[in-house]
Image (cartoon, rainbow, N blue to C red):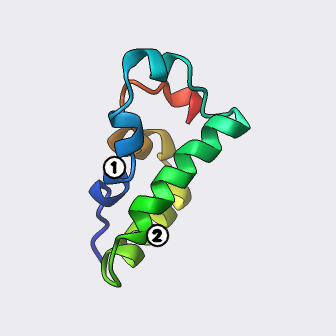
């Protein structure tokens, strides 16, 4: 089985399109900020078809079950977002 981490990265378009000020004012552990991000990600996820949706879920499962969660998240989370906040 091949894991496609790029599929998750595409769902972060919401963060990638934010201005520097917006990023500075966004804290992923804040319930309101996290809800905005997840809502935007769900909109993107809902556009995926029957092949890509399982690939995203497989990638998330792979990252969460790996012994290098931080390393794999670095591949998909925008670098402007501090990893300790993800």
Identify whether 79 is placed above or below 34: above
Identify whether 36 is placed above or below 30: below
Residue to which mark 1 is pinned: 9
Residue to which mark 2 is pinned: 57
Q: How far across and down, in percent of the image, does residue 86 sit?
A: 55, 36
* Quadrant, the N terminus: bottom left
Task: Count residues near mark 2 (Cα–Cα under 10 Å), then give few for <14, some for 14-19, many for 20+.
Answer: some
Helix, strand or loop for disc 1: helix
Between 49 and 80, the residue placed more toward the observer is 49
Task: Count residues near mark 1 (Cα–Cα under 10 Å), then give few for <14, some for 14-19, many for 20+.
Answer: some
Q: Residue at x 28, y 55 (%)?
A: 6
Left or right of residue 63, residue 76 in this image: left
Q: Residue at x 36, y 28 (%)?
A: 79
Q: Residue at x 39, y 60 (%)?
A: 44
Helix, strand or loop for disc 2: helix
Q: How far across and down, in percent of the image, does residue 5 sit?
A: 32, 56
Q: Residue at x 64, y 46 (%)?
A: 35
Q: How far across and down, in percent of the image, does residue 16 sit?
A: 34, 35
Identify whether 57 is placed above or below 6: below
């Amino acid at each position: 089985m091949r894991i496609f981490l790029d599929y998750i990265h595409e769902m972060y378009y919401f963060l990638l399109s934010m201005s520097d000020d917006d990023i500075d004012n966004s804290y992923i552990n804040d319930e309101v900020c996290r809800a905005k991000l997840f809502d935007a990600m769900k909109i993107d996820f809902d556009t995926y078809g029957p092949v890509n949706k399982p690939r995203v879920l497989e990638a998330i499962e792979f990252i969460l079950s790996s012994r290098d969660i931080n390393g794999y998240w670095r591949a998909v989370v925008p670098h402007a977002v501090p990893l300790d906040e993800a």
